[in-house]
Amino acid sequence: MNCIPIMINGLPGNVARIMTEAAFQDERFTLVPFSLTGEEISMTQVSVDQTKVTLLKPSEREDRINNILESYPGCICVDYTHPTAVNNNAKFYVAHKIPFVMGTTGGDRQDLENTVNNGSVPAVIAPNMAKQIVGLQAMLEYGASTFPGLFKGFTLQVKESHQQAKADTSGTAKALVACFNQLGTDFNISDIEKIRDPKIQKADLGVPEQYIEGHGWHTYTLKAPDGSALFELTHNINGRQIYVSGTFDAVVFLKNKIDANAFGRKLFTMIDVLTAGQ
């Protein structure tokens, strides 16, 4: 397989930077030295591994994108921007026929799906790019559809802790709540306890200091009505390497689909990536 041109959008954000640094070290990819960013960003370039990456604001990108795509044919975009940019970015990718992997959470997810389905290029969209967590979610979805009402009457408590800069409620937490509700709980997504205070994260949860600015700790607690039974599911992720691996596998998945002209549908999830053995 030839190197895949990959444009990582969201610099100078932390996740996009980590993805960009990893792409330099991955022989499967050629990094496109441009990155979509927010209109409010004052920087014009970011240095990553001694390479200058030019930042393109929404007001600038239309004038530059055609030349970029001519220089890097077959480019696939990776989006780790901001929840407020999700829908406009997706429309931009589809309008310019750029396949993309959307790791950014938030935005109008139904509109996002409609944008892809009404376009002509494939995309992988998932609230979580960590394959192990996605697999765990798939197991819960299987259990929910196979044993609906299994936890009827149980109460559910959900805590999710992420770095202070994460603006929205975890998409993974929302997805797992849907599974638990199908299993019989009656939990409102608005009741998810969203922890963003570093002091609480360190003192109460025990998040290591070096991961305060990049972690995802989730706990789901199910209690029987009479208190006689308790079930708890926890997944704690420190750093972002687990998301890098899954994201890059999603890029390769898209490339394989495109090369084989094998996408009867255009919208894919990380479950599709897992099923394909990436």
Image (tube, helix red, strand yellow):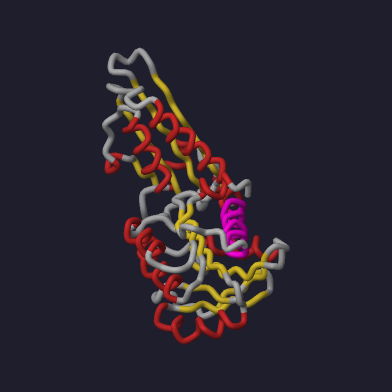
Q: Is residue 18 visible to the viewer in this orientation of the structure?
A: no
Magenta: main secondary structure: helix
Q: Give coordinates of residue 11: x percent, y percent.
A: 52, 69
Q: Nearer the viewer, residue 35 or 183?
A: 183
Q: Is residue 224 above or below residue 1?
A: above
Q: Give coordinates of residue 175: x percent, y percent.
A: 39, 42
Q: Nearer the viewer, residue 25 or 129?
A: 129
**Does the stretch in magenta take in 249?**
yes
Q: Is residue 149 above or below residue 111?
A: above
Q: Give coordinates of residue 62: x percent, y percent.
A: 44, 83
Q: Give coordinates of residue 209: x percent, y percent.
A: 55, 46
Q: Nearer the viewer, residue 35 or 136?
A: 136
* 260 to the left or right of 165: right
Q: Is residue 194 above or below residue 143?
A: below
Q: Residue at x 51, y 43 (%)?
A: 134
Quarter of the figure with the N terminus: bottom right
Segment colored magenta: 244-259
Q: Residue at x 45, y 68 (%)?
A: 120
Q: Is residue 50 visible to the viewer in this orientation of the structure?
A: yes
User: Total marks drawn?
Assistant: 0
Q: Nearer the viewer, residue 178 or 43?
A: 178
* 97 to the left or right of 193: right
* 42 to the left or right of 178: right
Q: Is residue 68 above or below residue 7?
A: below
**Does the stretch in magenta take in 142?**
no
Q: Residue at x 53, y 67 (%)?
A: 77
Q: Quadrant of residue 95?
A: bottom left
* 125 to the left or right of 185: right
